[in-house]
Every structure is written in structure tokens, then in C-alpha cells.
Image (cartoon, rainbow, N blue to C red):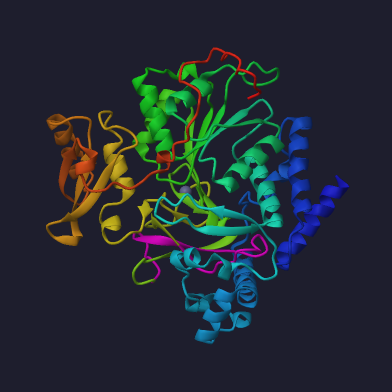
Amino acid sequence: MFATAISQLRYGAAILTNRRIRPGDLERLARDLVDTIAEFGEPGEDSAQLPGRAGHVDPQLRREVARRSLRATARAAVRHTAYYRRRFAELDLDPATLEPEDWSRVPVTPKQALKALPAAFVSAAASPALMALTTGTSGTPTAVWFSRAEIETAIAFSTISAVLGLGLRPRHTVAYAGCSRATLPLVYAEESTTRAGAGFVQFGTVDPALALDRLAAPLGLPGRAPQITHLTTSASYLAALVQEAEQQKWQHGDFGLESISVGGEVLSAPLRRRAEAVFGAAVASAYLMTEILPSGASPCTEGHLHHTTEFGHLEVLDPVSGEPTTPGGIGTVVHTPYVPYRECTLLLRYATGDLVRLPDGQPDCELAHLPATSGILGRWSGPLSTAVTTREVLDLVEAEPEVPLPARYALTEGPAGPTGPARLHLLVPRLPATALLGRLEERAAAAGLRLSAIVLHEDRAAMPPTAPVRADLREHSFEAPGASAPAPPTPGGVE
Ligand SMILES: [Zn+2]
């Protein structure tokens, strides 16, 4: 306990002075939390004050922390990275005197700049250890270097969040059905799960029929729940699982799932409902992004996303003018992850491209003390992406069981040009689908969607190109669905 108190003090001091965090201090805090639960069955009263738990902080103190953290992050970026040294010199900006009111003078960093030259953002004072490549459904992947200390620090944060946020306990088993090449989220998921004392299995994005077999299979482990209890995946792969489960008449009683965590893509309301019905588990979607880790956002019970103020600074800006979005309007998430949580790839005002809507008034929910936005609406790709958002399309089409999941659709300009109502093209199994079209038109009109027409297609090759989704990164397996009987021994070999 004494060692833990020392770790807590050292961690607190590092944060107050924006100095390097010792990963060992955080690791000790996470380990102590797991031990406390093992001994007393519940976390201690002070657990709400643990790092990453978004405890209530005096607003005045929060403003002061933001002021110091922005300045410290800008100083580190200018001192140690080629990109910001050049940009600040061109603009004659001195990071040492930056005040929050001047923050808008710092240029927004476009995604393209990081994609083009990741090394220009790597601090000369850090030791790059792991290159995380984003899945890159939007084209070329983005490369982000992380140091060993950053990875260890973030693992400690995810352990605390797995135990307190997700409620992971040693009786649980987590399946991870995300792309096996995405090293960083995989390492975080595996390490935080096993440090919480729970079991972990990596599925990858295999044939959905196989994944369902594995989710339903008995584990037969003493002291453990009889089946897999938690699933982590992307929204499009969850859609593929829901489709397969509904078609093959799986029932929620076939599974032992308690919770499904979805990240990286827009989770529509109807997909969430269908997944909850067929799997009998609550589905939640948080906001995490490789470039801004460990910053991110969590959903509240009112459906907002609440963004951390502990690990970084959120702005919501108009994607064209760069001006702050006004209440009720749509803008893109621009984020500055703070030192000392980040020390390797340093980013100031990073334009994520993720679209959100700002609430109209002050939210009145359990996370109201943290900045709120809507859930992610989609990704900025020009005026069409805000005329009708990905979320609006998915809320419309994923409610129709006739539409194959993940839904394949495209938006094209309507007769009034790029800022007018758009045409929605949707892939369906067969034409004519008159009743389906009628329902879609009626529901689109009722929801006020800015669509000039809905066009159904039965040939994907003949329709406008549809956007790739993560479920398209299918991983092959030698296993056949339904073949849960033990396989015959491999001739002469060890598998
Ligand atoms: Zn809220």
C-alpha cells in the first residue's frame, strides 16, 4: 500500500509539471486496483480518482490544466519535431507564451501531413518502438510511432478502464474480433484483459459463421463463466455477425455474452437493437483513434459522446472554414493529445476528419462535466458527407432485415449539385423490391433526410462504388463452420 501511495504521488507530480510519467507507477496503480477487487470484491472508494476515470474536477483547475498542457505540448512539439519547428517559425509563433486565447493561431494539422511524412512528427527526444498502422479504409494507412513507455502507460489506463468501466473480472473471457494486423489495439485489449485476471482469445475477422461457433462453444474452465462473456469488434463486422446469426436462427440463449464493445466505425441504432436482440448482450460504442490515444470519448446514457479533458484537448471545427462549430451544428473533431501521456508522435490540432454534431444546450447527464458531442456521424469527404451523414444512412437501411449486412451503399450528387439533396444507391438481394423501396422512402421522408432519390441495385458491379468497411478485411482460416468435432491428427506434424 505504501509503494502504491508513492506511485500515486509520483504520477501526480509528473502530471502537474508535464514531466515524463514512469510507466511503473501507473502499472502499480492498476495492479493494486485488481488486487483490491480480488480481496474485497469491489474497488476502493478512491477508485473514481484513478487516472482516466474522468472524476469531477473543479472547472477553474481544469482550465488551468488545459492552459499548461497545451503550452507544454506545443513547446515539446516545436523543440523536438521537424514539422512544428518549421510551421511555428514560418508563423513567428512562440510556444512558450501561448495562451488558450491564441490557440486558434496554431495551424490545424491535416491528416494528409501525417500520412505523407510520419517521421516529421516523431520527437527527437523519444525512442520510437512500435509503428501503429491505421486500418486505412479511406486509402493509405496512417503510420503513428509509439514509444515503449507510451504503450506501457496506455496499457495501465486500459486495465483500469477494463476493470472499472467494463467491469471485467477473473470469471470473464473476452473475444477480440478485430483485424489481427492492427497491433496496437490488439496489444491493449490482450494486456488489459489478462492483467484484470480475465481470459482473452483473438478471433480475428474470420468467416462470421466460425466466429458464432466459437462464441457459442463451451469453455469448460473451472471458476470461469461457461462461455465467452465479452466481445470487442468493429460495427461492420458486428453487422456481418448479426446477419449470419439471424439467418441461421441463432438465439440469444445460445450465447453467454454479457457485453459487446464496438469501435472504429459508426454503430447505428437499429444495428445495436438487432445485435442486442440476437446476442442478449448490451452493445456500447466508445471513440478511440490511434492518432490521438490515450485520448478518446465515452458514451453516456443520453447518447452523447463525452470527450476526455485529462489526456487531450478537443475542438469541433468547420471542415472548410476551420472556424469553431456553433451549438447544434456539424463539425469535425480536432484533437491535441497532451504530453506527458504522449512523447513520441506529437500532434497539435490534429484534424481527425470525424464528423460530430454539437448539442444545442448544456447536457444534463451523468457525464455533463465533460465536453459533449453527438456520436460519430461519419467521416468528412466533401459536402455530400454532411448533406446526408453515414449515421443517417445506416439508421435508415440497417433497420430493414431485407438489406444484406454490412449494408453496401453510395451517395451521389442529386440534381441540385453537391450541396443539394443526394441520391442514395443501395444494394439489395433482388429486384424489384417495391415494398422495401416504399418503406425506405417513407422512413427517409419522416426522418427529414436530404435525399432526392433512393435507387436500389441488385448488381454491385453496376452501382456507384461503395465505401470499404473493416469487415472486408476478412482473414482466412482452415476451420470449417459447424465442424466443432476434433479434427483428425495432422499427418506427421505438430500444428
Ligand atoms: Zn451525456
* Image coords of residue 113 (percent x, y): 47, 68
* Residue at image point 44% right, 41% down: 473
Q: Check if residue 333 falls in the magenta segment.
A: yes
Residue reaching furthest to the front: 492
Query: Residue 118, how many percent across, how many down?
Result: 54, 65
Q: Is residue 450 magenta?
A: no
Q: Which residues are magenta?
A: 323-351
Residue 203 or residue 13, whichever sits in front: 203
Q: Is residue 274 left or right of residue 27?
A: left
Residue 229 x/y as whole percent? 57, 26
Q: Is residue 373 left or right of residue 366?
A: left
Quadrant where the N terminus is found in the figure: top right
Give the vertical position of 274 relative to 291 (above or below).
above
Question: Going by the picture, which residue comes out furthest to the right?
Answer: 2
Q: Is residue 350 above or below residue 158?
A: below
- In the image, 208 versus 367, the foreground residue is 208
Would residue 94 be found to the left or right of residue 340 on screen? left
Residue 321 figure quarter = bottom left
